[in-house]
Image (cartoon, rainbow, N blue to C red):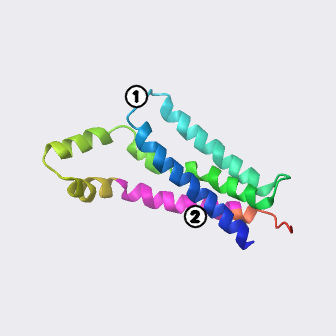
Amino acid sequence: MMISLLALIGGWALCLALIALVAPRVAHLRRQPAQETYYTHAAWASLIGAFWLSSAPPPWPFHSAMLMSGALSAPFCTLPIYRRLVGRVEALSRAASGLGAGSRARIRLLWFPLLRGPILLSCLISLVALTFCFMLAKPVHV
């Protein structure tokens, strides 16, 4: 069971790292209003897929199913941060830099208070989702 837990957390961390690498490159693209709901719906669907995959392991090795289940639960865990960042962040950051705030001051006075609640909520959602995926898993003896 310990290897499956490590596979679950590893898949979650791998997907979060990929999201962190891709997000800054995608942030500068023009967004349509409907695209905001695409990410929300895709995150919900991936969470449902993660629960299904952890409860009914496919014929391939069990630990790879847990790795994929962890990776599928990661987009849902980033949803509170995404919802906070959509929309007004560019104007706030531009205004802070226009008023003379350096990068350290923007992090301390703008980003930390802005994202404190969503980051804590994301951590709580991650803990609940990973625990639920782990509790749904049926032990498989290989």
Q: Residues within 10 Å of mark 1 (few under 14, many from 20)?
A: few
Q: Which mark is residue 136?
A: none
Residue at 86% in and 52% down:
59
Majority secondary structure in the magenta region: helix
Q: Percent position (x, y) of residue 27? A: 40, 38
State which quadrant residue 117 falls in: bottom left
Q: State how far apart marks 2 and 1 are (Cα).
A: 33 Å
128, 112: nearer the viewer: 112
Which residue is most to the bottom? 2
- Above or below, 52 relative to 66: above
Q: Which residues are magenta?
A: 115-133
- Above or below, 130 relative to 58: below
Residue at 13% in and 45% down:
99
State which quadrant residue 2 falls in: bottom right
In terms of sequence position, does the residue under pointer 2 or pointer 1 come before the other? 1
Which residue is most to the left? 100
Q: Which structural element holds mark 1?
A: loop
Q: Is residue 85 left or right of residue 51?
A: left
Q: Residues within 10 Å of mark 2 (few under 14, many from 20)?
A: few
> Is 104 a magenta residue?
no
Q: Percent position (x, y) of residue 108? A: 25, 59
> Is 127 a magenta residue?
yes
State which quadrant residue 86 falls in: top left
Residue that label 2 marks: 127
The quadrant of the rendering that contains the N terminus is bottom right
Amino acid bearing label 1: Arg
Residue that label 1 marks: 30
Amino acid bearing label 2: Leu
